[in-house]
Amino acid sequence: MTTAPAKEQFDVIIVGAGPAGSVAALLSARAGLKVLLLERGEYPGAKNVSGAVFYGSAILNQLIPNWWEQAPVERYICRRDIAFMSPTTAVALDFRSAGAGYATAPYNGFTVLRPKFDRWLAAQAEAAGAFLLTSAVVDDVLRENGRIVGVRVRREQGEIYAKVVIACDGVNSFLAKKAGLQREFHSHELSLGVKEVLGLDPAIIQDRFHLSGNEGIAFEYLGAITEDVHGGAFLYTNHDSLSLGVIGQVSSLVERRKRSYELLEGFKAHPAVAPLVRGGKLREYSAHLIPESGWSMQPKLYTGGMLVAGDAAGFCLAAGLYLEGMNYAMQSGLAAAETAIVACQRGNFSARTLAIYRKYLKQRHVSTDFRAYRHAPSFVNGPRLQNLYPEMVARGMEQIFRVDGAPKQKILPLAYRMVRQSSIKPGQLLHDVYQVARAYLW
């Protein structure tokens, strides 16, 4: 007589070793739970786009005090620039933060290279007692009596069971769809980001960008930089490289029949950008889908035995003034872990118990931020803000600063004339003013 093999059982299975998954694993393991962290790449970060700005220093500092002293960070962000572009000019808003560098880390962002950073963060979860399994492709969820009780991994005897599954598997979350929590997204809700990492000598970076020591700068661009595609571009300084790329709304790329890599080449050739990237040697090229519609595209976040966090839950705040994802990924991962800990303490893993996830998301200001800025994505991704207004600002400043013997122009008449010459109708302008107020002022 033979007996059936024992089920491989964990308290928590977390799918995806990005920022959301790794901090969820870290907190759960510290609470004494048996945790399995699954990653489909060869190592955490292998499938993630490299080069990013992490603005969640204070969040991670609560878990790992002075984490930046041991983490593979590149530079701390002391300057942020937002540039409005025409085909030949740029007007920038320059924000500088005075401080003592790393000592002020909880209030600054850091540039990071995701393969290095994600690998380090997952190692912190391992050190706390979590089990990390890489090259693990999850094919399905397991159900018993209407509740999710585990996942099926593509390997021999691949059924792995858990009291709670946390899906942190990215924007097109396979698990959330399998669980019936996530609908199919529309193309206007997603953007495609293409990115390059260009190697450059640290001394050249410091001289070219007027930086000292480990200081860094983050540039964000709007306007003609993406031609008639709705989107934007960015450039971040790392220790010995630059991370730069273009983000384009998927529906807009399709409608205009534009290729992202062509927009990226045009971005690098722009007169305001070309001097900054001169001499850079290509180290990496990658692409990534980004959830940009915020509140309106979030799935149902829980069901019996399962929670959804990070990009899988649409927690990327693309609201014009704010372009943040890693910090919300971590906050949602921590909220999911807190929920799983409570469920294990109660011995109840029903949807009713896991509904406390909403409370923890609110306490960590995730749901409150996304609700407050729920109107911003539709305005930010609109054609006038993306393509028309930035170019008008740039051209207007060009007119103001022109010295050609003609009479000096006052700002209000110039603005009025530019609006009259554009395709903007008075009703559209008033509508956009209302949209700005609704998105950012109340």
Image (cartoon, grey):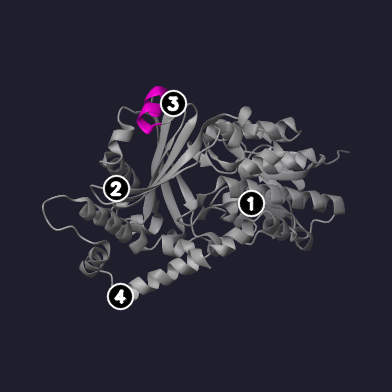
Residue most toward the right? Answer: 1
**Disc 3 to disc 4, C-alpha distance:** 49 Å
Q: Residues within 10 Å of mark 4 (few under 14, many from 20)?
A: few
Nearer the N terminus, badge 1 or badge 2? 2
Q: Nearer the viewer, mark 3 or mark 1?
A: 3
The picture places residue 250, in percent across and down from the top left corner, at 40, 55
Tell me, yes or no, whether the two marked residues, 3 and 2, touch with CB atoms within 8 Å: no
Q: Which residues are magenta?
A: 202-210
Residue placed under numbered mark 1 in the picture: 309
Disc 2 residue type? Ala
The picture places residue 30, in percent across and down from the top left corner, at 78, 38
At x 65% / y 44%, what residue is drawn? 59
Determine if the magenta segment contains residue 122.
no
**Closer to us: 357 or 442:** 442
Determine if the magenta segment contains residue 209.
yes
At x 67% / y 34%, what residue is drawn? 133
Numbered circle sitting on residue 90: 2
Residue most toward the bottom? Answer: 427
Disc 1 residue type? Ala
Q: Residues within 10 Å of mark 3 (few under 14, many from 20)?
A: some
Q: Nearer the viewer, mark 4 or mark 1?
A: 4
Residue 40 against residue 391 in the figure, above or below: above
Residue placed under numbered mark 4 in the picture: 426
**Disc 3 to disc 1, C-alpha distance:** 32 Å
